[in-house]
Image: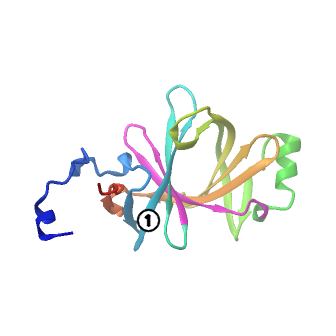
Amino acid sequence: MGWKDLFKKKKSTGLSLTDLTLSNLGPGYYLDYDMKTWCVEACHMYDWGEGDRTYEWQLVSHDDTLYLEREPDDEDHWSVSRKVPFGKLGEDLKSQIMERGDPPNEIIYEGTAYYLEGSGGGQFYKDGKGDGRDLLTWDYVDESGKQYLTIEQWGEADFEAALGYPVAEYQFDNILPAGEADD
């Protein structure tokens, strides 16, 4: 690169600084949270019916993976979660759900009791598009209301679990758009 290249006009990305918000994150974006820099790996959408949707961004750092969720309502509700090994929720939990159709009203995980708060079914759209994949969810909350546990059932016998907590939008900063290749 010569000194004259410094004065060449760069192509505009079409983004303004006001577009750099959590709601507008896309794959390849970077942001800071909890003293780490995260890269947005994917953006997914859950459709719960009747216009009720949840948006999820998979964030990856050098040693961790987080799931940032936004539930739009009168105001946006934000949370982050991490997957936990489903088997650690109880030896017979999977068989109990398969036999009875529902998990118990209380689950103990790592010494904390979580109480069933709600359940539902919907469609998951990988990268926010394509054919939806059916899922069932059960949402649990601890006594303080500051941590939650979610169980997801994908098909007959495929289960996942995640542990999460609410966050505020201001906790995320230094949002940078996806880089573009130089021409």
Q: How many numbered marks does the figure carry?
A: 1
Quadrant (top left, top right, bottom left, bottom right) of the C terminus: bottom left
**Left or right of 1 on screen, residue 56:** right
| Direction from residue 20 to residue 54 in the image, left or right | right
Tell which of 5 and 170 is nearer to you.
5
Residue 140 shown in magenta: no
Q: Tell me the residue at 73%/58% (across/down).
A: 107
| 4 or 138, nearer to the observer | 4
The residue that disc 1 covers is 38
For the N terminus, the image quarter is bottom left
Q: Which residues are magenta?
A: 65-87
Residue 16 coordinates in the image, percent (x, y): 21, 48
Question: What's the magenta bit mostly, secondary-structure-wise?
Answer: strand
Color theme of the render: rainbow
Q: Which is nearer the eye, 98 or 158?
A: 158
Furthest toward the top, the residue is: 50
Q: Secondary structure at mark 1?
A: strand
The residue drawn where x is 85% and y is 61% is: 91
**Which percent across, then down, holds residue 130?**
57, 33
117 or 131: nearer the viewer: 131
Vertically, is 170 above or below 137? below
Category of crowding for the residue at label 1, using alpha-carbon neighbours closer than 10 angstroms: few (below 14), some (14–19), many (at least 20): many
Label 1 sits on what residue type? Trp
| 68 part of magenta stretch | yes
Residue 129 on image: x %, y %: 53, 35
- The answer to which quarter of the image holds residue 46 is top right
Relative side of 122 to 19, left or right: right
Q: Is 13 left, or right, of 172 in this rendering?
A: left
Q: Give x and y (percent) for residue 27.
A: 44, 52
Tell me what residue is drawn at x 40 percent, y 66 percent. 33
